[in-house]
Amino acid sequence: MMITLPTSGKEAQIKYRDGDYQIIRSGSYVTCAVTGRPIPLDDLKYWSVDRQEPYIDPAASYKAEKEAAARKS
């Protein structure tokens, strides 16, 4: 997957929901909770509703799920 990273603009504040999200503060990107890389809103496809975190790709989402499960046990 090729993601074009934003070169300008501000970070959006998002409320993540099941299947969609609500923009609380407008911006052009969010920051991946695992990698720290910016995710353009047009490319945002992975997030956790429970943790309210965005992820850049499935691998980052999986890593966050594994780490959250390890903390619970």
Image (tube, helix red, strand yellow):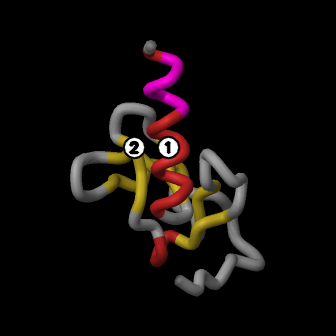
Q: Are marks 1 and 2 in contact (CB under 8 Å)?
A: yes
Quarter the C terminus occupies:
top left
Q: Amino acid at mark 1?
A: Glu
- Taking the view exactly as shown, the residue that stands out farthest to the top is 73
The residue depicted at 41 percent of the width and 59 percent of the height is 46
Residue 10: quadrant of the picture: bottom right
Instruction: Check disc 2: other Cα within 10 Å, few if <14, some if 14-19, many if 20+.
Output: some
Q: Residues within 10 Å of mark 1 (few under 14, many from 20)?
A: some
Question: Residue 57, percent across and down?
Answer: 51, 65
Element under label 1?
Answer: strand
Residue at the disc numbered 1: 53
Most foreground residue, 21 or 65? 65
Q: Earlier in the sequence, mark 1 or mark 2?
A: 2
Outermost residue toward the right? 7
> Dominant secondary structure of the magenta stretch?
helix
Under circle 2, the secondary element is strand
What range is drawn magenta here? 67-71
Q: Is 61 situated above or below 4?
A: above
Q: Tell me the residue at 45%/39% (across/down).
A: 65
Where is residue 45? Give x, y as percent. Answer: 40, 66
**Looking at the picture, how far across and down is residue 48, in whole percent?**
39, 43
Residue that numbered label 2 is attached to: 48
Q: Residue at x 63, y 47 (%)?
A: 34
